[in-house]
Image (cartoon, grey):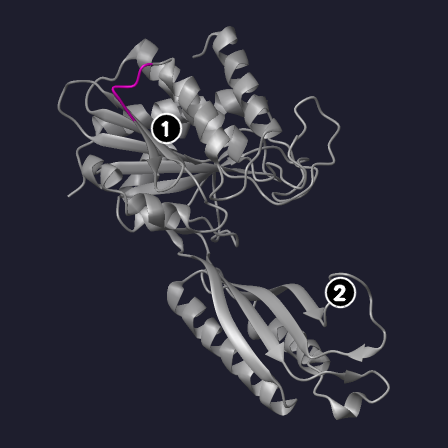
Amino acid sequence: MMESEELRDLIRLRHELHAHPELSGRETETARRVQAFLERHRPDELHTGVGGHGLLAVFDSGRPGPSVAVRCELDALPIEEPNDIPHRSTNPGVSHKCGHDGHAATVAGLAGLIRRRGLPRGKAVLLFQPAEESGEGARAMLADRRLRDLQPDWMFAFHNLPRHPLGQVIVRDGVFASASVGLLVRFHGSGSHSSYPEHGRSPAPAVAELIERLGTLGDPAAPPGDLTLATVTQATVGEMARKVDFGVAPSSGCVAAVLRANRQEKLDALKQRAEEAAAETAARHGVEAGISWHEEFAATANHGEAGAMVRQAARRAGLPLAEAPEPFRWSEDFGLFLQTFPGALFGLGSGESLPQLHNEYYDYPDDLIATGLAVYWALLEEALAANSPN
């Protein structure tokens, strides 16, 4: 499908993006690098600054037909890069540990294929999304009239999946990835000398109790489709910004957790139970609790006809196909796009020995770029041959 020099060019782009990662909402240079690459392939339209630092590259066949969008992400994670590799991150404390560098290089590669091969009909829209990790990017892009004006008939994306065979296409009808939301509970009491803790109102007992209670709210062993899970991600008591202070009984503390469920109504019920647990715990220990919600992701629910196209594209590309028996626990804000446009999110195995996503030693496999391009090209052919959805 690809000339060897084209593939080497995409690997160089992936390495360049990996070496210069940027966090959600700060993808200025990442977008600039992708834009420069796209301009070499002369899209019919190239929109920048979409929903922040997003890009839309439009290729128009000039013939009536569906508009098919393929989406990838631009942002990285606040994780230090320990790998001793030539393309190691040069941005301290930031690295591509979810594979967005590989996703972006793959979708950018479609520009060259489209320009060289042409489209039989309709349009192809290459969508480069900012701020996926924070759950803000899809919403911001959907609010931008330039995407609304394009009105894609179909929208597709893949996410690489470690612990699955390299190149395996993983599909599922209905919910593919779970809904989630971040919970932050801030406890406030009053401080005291550590020799007289009873003269203050320390939040330490409340923090300890809430950590335990949150762990009992979900049901990770529930049947497929009914998962609910609460995971504590951070907890602090007192202030340790400048030095450890053994003379002060603390006046503040906080607990951060992420709540997950396969269905929105399950997540809403879990949120209510978490709020009640925080309020009851604070009251029992005589402290106040401030509750806030962050980084909310909708469930990613695939459309049946779009899922069928993914299966057929995998077969056309000669790739192994697997059905996911239950929704994945992680979240993706591609779910918001699928509430507006018909489409599907699917998985692409990145190797059974690869570290898990968000692991500090993870690095997107270069071999997956050609595989991703093969399935995307076959998917474009399938979607462009289909009728527009009703």
> Real-space Cα distance between discs 1 and 2?
54 Å
Instruction: Inspect this view and state whether residue 372 appears.
Output: no
Amino acid bearing label 1: Ala
Please provide percent x and percent y for residue 278. Answer: 56, 80
What secondary structure do most residues of the magenta stretch adopt? loop
Stretch of the chain drawn in magenta:
42-46
Please provide percent x and percent y for residue 120. Answer: 22, 17
Q: Nearer the viewer, mark 1 or mark 2?
A: 2
Looking at the image, is 40 positioned above or below residue 300?
above
Instruction: Inspect this view and state whether residue 108 appears.
Output: yes
Question: Would residue 145 be found to the left or right of residue 369 on screen?
Answer: left
Residue that numbered label 2 is attached to? 240
Please provide percent x and percent y for residue 242. Answer: 77, 61
Disc 2 on helix, strand or loop?
Answer: loop
In primary-sequence order, the first of circles 1 and 2 is 2
Looking at the image, is 93 positioned above or below residue 234?
above
Q: Is residue 45 magenta?
A: yes
Amino acid bearing label 2: Met
**How would you rate the neighbour count of disc 1 (Cα within 10 Å): few for under 14, some for 14-19, many for 20 or more?**
many
**In this orientation, which residue lies closer to the viewer: 344 or 280?**
280
Please provide percent x and percent y for residue 8. Answer: 54, 12
Q: Give me the residue at 48% from left, 66% from top.
A: 293
